[in-house]
Image (tube, rainbow, N blue to C red):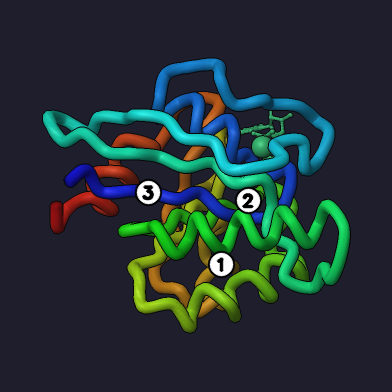
Amino acid sequence: MKPTVVLVGRPNVGKSTLFNRLTKTRDALVADLPGLTRDRHYGHGKSGSKPFLVVDTGGFEPLAKDGILHEMARQTEQAIAEADVVIFVVDGRQGITAHDKDIANKLRRLDRPVFVAVNKTEGMDKGVTTADFHELGLGEPWSISASHGEGVRGLVEMALEPY
Ligand code: GDP
Ligand code: MG
C-alpha cells in the first residue's frame, strides 16, 4: 500500500503549490484567492523509488459550523482520517496566526505523524523563520519553498522515512 500524505493548513499558505510540486502537475488550482480548492484532491508522487499518494485539502476551518466552510472542514477531517502522514503547511512570511494555532491544537491530538512545513522561505534566513513555529508544539519545523522547490524533497524523504 502506498502511504498517503495529506496537506493541511489554512487558506493561501501554499498547499496547492506544494501539491503541484509533489505530483508535478498543474491539477490543483493555485490562486491568490484563499480557499479556492473546495474539496479533496488526490495525486501521485514519488520520493526516490517510493511512490506515495498526496491529498490537497481545501482549507481547515475547525470553527466553521455551517455551509461551505463546514463541508470543507468535514472533507479535511476525512482526508486526515485516511492519512499516514500529515504535512501542516504554514506561511513563513506571515508567521504564526491564531488560525494556525487552532489547527495545531487539533493536529496534536492525532495519532499520526505531523510535519510542520514552513513555506515561502525562499531568500529568507531559514533558522530565524522556522524558530517561531516551534511554538506550535508539533516538533521541529521544516523550511521549504513550494514555488521554488527548496526543501521539498528533504521534507518528503523525512516524512516517508518509515515506509
Ligand atoms: P493554498 O490556498 O494553501 O492552496 O495556497 P496556494 O498554493 O493556492 O498558494 C497561495 C499563494 O501563495 C499563491 O499566490 C502562490 O503563488 C503563493 N505561494 C505558494 N508557495 C509559495 C512559496 O514557496 N513562496 C512564495 N513566495 N509564494 C508562494
Ligand atoms: Mg489550494
Q: Judge from the rendering whether residue 133 lies leftward or rightward of residue 110; answer left or right.
A: right
**Res 46 seen here:** yes
Residue 142 location in percent, x, y? 42, 54
Q: Earlier in the sequence, mark 2 or mark 1?
A: 2
Label 1, residues with CA under 10 Å away: few <14, some 14-19, many ≥20:
many
Residue shown at the point (72%, 40%) measured from the top left: 38
Residue shown at the point (23%, 50%) measured from the top left: 160
Tell me which amino acid carries mark 2.
Gly
Mark 1–mark 3 distance (CA, rounded to whole Å): 21 Å
Q: Is residue 111 above or below residue 81?
A: below
Task: State yes or no: discs 2 and 1 in contact (Cβ < 8 Å).
Answer: yes
Q: Of tags 2 and 3, which is closer to the observer? A: 3
Q: Which residue is mark 3?
A: 5
Q: Which residue is mark 2?
A: 92
Q: Of tags 1 and 3, which is closer to the observer? A: 3
Residue 31 location in percent, x, y? 75, 27
Q: Earlier in the sequence, mark 2 or mark 3?
A: 3
| Nearest to the observer: residue 157 or residue 112 | 112
Residue 72 location in percent, x, y? 71, 53
Classify residue 66 by image quadrant.
bottom right
Mark 2–mark 1 distance (CA, rounded to whole Å): 9 Å
Mark 2–mark 3 distance (CA, rounded to whole Å): 21 Å
Q: Which residue is mark 1?
A: 133
| Nearest to the observer: residue 93 or residue 161 | 161
| Dot 2: element | loop
Task: State yes or no: discs 2 and 3 in contact (Cβ < 8 Å).
Answer: no
| Dot 3: element | strand
